[in-house]
Image (spheres, coloured by chain):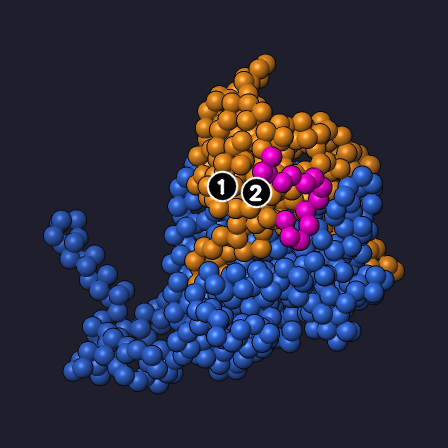
Amino acid sequence: MDPTSRAFIENAHAGLANPVLRRALGIAGTGFPARRSEAIARLPEFEALRDAGKAIKDHTIAHLDFYLELYEKNVAAAGGVVHWARDAAEARAAVLEICRSVDAKIVTKGKSMVAEEIALNDHLEKNGITPVETDLGEYIIQLRHEPPSHIIAPAIHLMKEQVTEAFRAAHTDLDPDRAITEAPQLCAEARAVLRPKFLAADVGITGANFLVAETGSSIIVTNEGNGDLTQTLPKVHIVVASLEKIVPTLEDAATLLRLLARSATGQEFSSYTTMSTGPRRKDDVDGPEQYHVVLVDNGRSAMIGGEFQEMLRCLRCAACLNHCPVYTAIGGHAYGWVYPGPMGAVLTPALIGVAEAGHLPNASSFCGRCESVCPVKIPLPKMMRHWRERQFAQRQVAPVYRSGLKLWAWVAQRPALYHALVEIKARLLGWLGARRGRFRTLPLAGGWTEQRDMPAPEGRSFHALWAERQRTCQRETGQ
Amino acid sequence: MSARDDIIGGIRSGLGRPALSEAAKGGLAARVAAHRRNLVPARAASLDAAGQVRLFVTMAQAVQTTVVRIASDREAPAEIARYLAAENLPAELRIAPDPALDELPWAERPLLTVRRGKAEAGDAVSLTPCLAAVAETGTLMLTSGEATPTTLNFLPDTHIVMLRASQVVASYEDGWDLLRTRGALPRTVNFITGPSRTGDIEQKIELGAHGPRRLHVILIDDAKTGRRK
């Protein structure tokens, strides 16, 4: 998909003005955090597991060349094939070539953010292959021709009325008077419509939550069972995964699995955690005949050794989205590409460039909730700050902000001057605002006063009041 | 230069080092081979065998798995017939082609139609064995194989699983160890924790999204022998 991250400010305003989105995000912004904190309260070891999870990922990235080679060797030993892709175009080409080799017409898909990242569906369609999303949320947004707005709940921006509308428009062979206004009816309809697609598919494509070097296995975590039908019924199973999904051993995977479901949905464990190793065995009576892994770099290896390496720990649980006051106000589409919220604000500039996605790391109040809920302790606010510094260094910040910041820095380094200027400003604003107690408009602060009034200062600066208080105290205690 | 060499080279230059020495590789290979466990929560590991079975049942029921306990697997056909009738389900069963299931006294239940093999599109109810069950989260562990086709776990509306109390283990790590004792890995290992569900419409949980709407465990109370904690 082409990014619209440059239009973040307009996108965010549109999100704020969308009443359906406000209602939908209201449900999401309370439900996910509450369920997560209940799940964590039931597991006293959760904090220690976060440290263990962080250590596993750091160890793996520090030896990623070794673990990728071990992984590839073990995939091959189990009869599978690894296809290395430097970028999105190579990944798309690898998937298409496999599909063509079996003359595929219909391809079912489990939910995969990397497949979104490489814009796989468009590419398959252009080449005459029909991709069918099978995760309910992904299916809904595929019908609506829109991107996901959340990395684990792609249709979270919608209410059931929009789903009803999408199903009526798409399922024209069904009775137009059927009742599909409630969630159970909608789920039943999706199940009935998609079941024949699962059975007809020539190729099944899934993502991976983990790739296990020790065994050459891929692991997917789902609740619907769509990923399992996708990878079990067709002749060919293709896994599309980015290379930082590697973990050394099954034990390491177990530790990260304990963190993932609790952080994501607040479940103890997702309904289905499935590990796949190679194609069906000689005596198996079902399962795919071919197993391929398209291993996608697309900018990850360039993050190693730099300020954003720690982002490669990310498990894609979405806890940072669910707890972000910005994400839960504007929704995922405002971010303009595949990854929204705090993790997107850090990852998107690394993958598509800070020139394209420079607004994203600026859309943060730095409240720090994202870092505090991250299961692998990624310092998201710190990394957003790194992007801001880089934008400043690369002169991507508007001249008026640059000169303003420079002027402020010059003054701030001269405490006497700074205090004097603040004192003057406080007195002036205090005098001007004395009558109303607030300002409706202020020069240079339109961004603030557009949405709310600025309270008028009392007339003295904090420093002046503090100094006075210190003097009084000293007099009273006689010191 | 191949994509593979480019990517591996890029990783090494990011890490600021050449390929690892043989000694360093040996150290990492030893870490992998050791199967060292990270922190395992005490929740299940601190219980004795009977406590782990009780925890499995509690955790499984919390995610809408239904559990019934019987004294011997000989009672399974009667119990399955009772369950299907009580749930108003067809008296038809697709069973895993597992010799142990073949030996159950199906003839005592002539009204129950029993077919063996992988699941077909129209199958309403499946019956499978499992490798183990993880007490920590009420999770069943199933493996693919000649006698245990994976489609049985996902295609039918109702999935019934036979579990012996002696198969209950504390943690996923115990499950991995069990798997390793059985030689080469199977194509698929399914950890199943409750029936299929989705929250994709307004965050309300609906059961039976694409996989089974019902997950029913028949727990056979065989005595645990020679195994403590």
Query: What residue would you read off at disc 2?
Result: B91
Q: Which chain is orange?
A: B
> Nearest the camera: A77 or B212?
B212
Callout 1–callout 2 Cβ contact below 8 Å: yes
Q: In the image shown, does B44 or B205 lie closer to the viewer? A: B205
The quarter of the image holding the N terminus of chain A is bottom right
Residue stretch rendered in magenta on the structure: B110-123
Q: Position of residue B212 (x, y in %)?
A: 56, 49
Residue A272, label in figure: none
Asked whether residue A213 appears in the rendered view, the answer is: no
Q: Is A40 displayed left or right of A479 in the figure?
A: right
- Along the viewing direction, whichever of B26 and A38 lies nearer the viewer: A38
Name the residue located 68 percent from the left edge and 40 percent from the top edge.
B115
In the image, residue A237 lies in the stretch drawn in magenta = no
Chain coloured blue here? A
Dominant SS in magenta: loop
Question: Would residue B146 appear left or right of B219 to someone viewing this image?
Answer: right
Q: Residue furthest front?
A: B110
Q: CA distance from mark 1 to mark 2?
A: 7 Å
Residue drawn at 26 percent across, 81 percent down:
A439
Mark 2: secondary structure:
loop
Helix or strand or loop: what does disc 1 sit on? helix
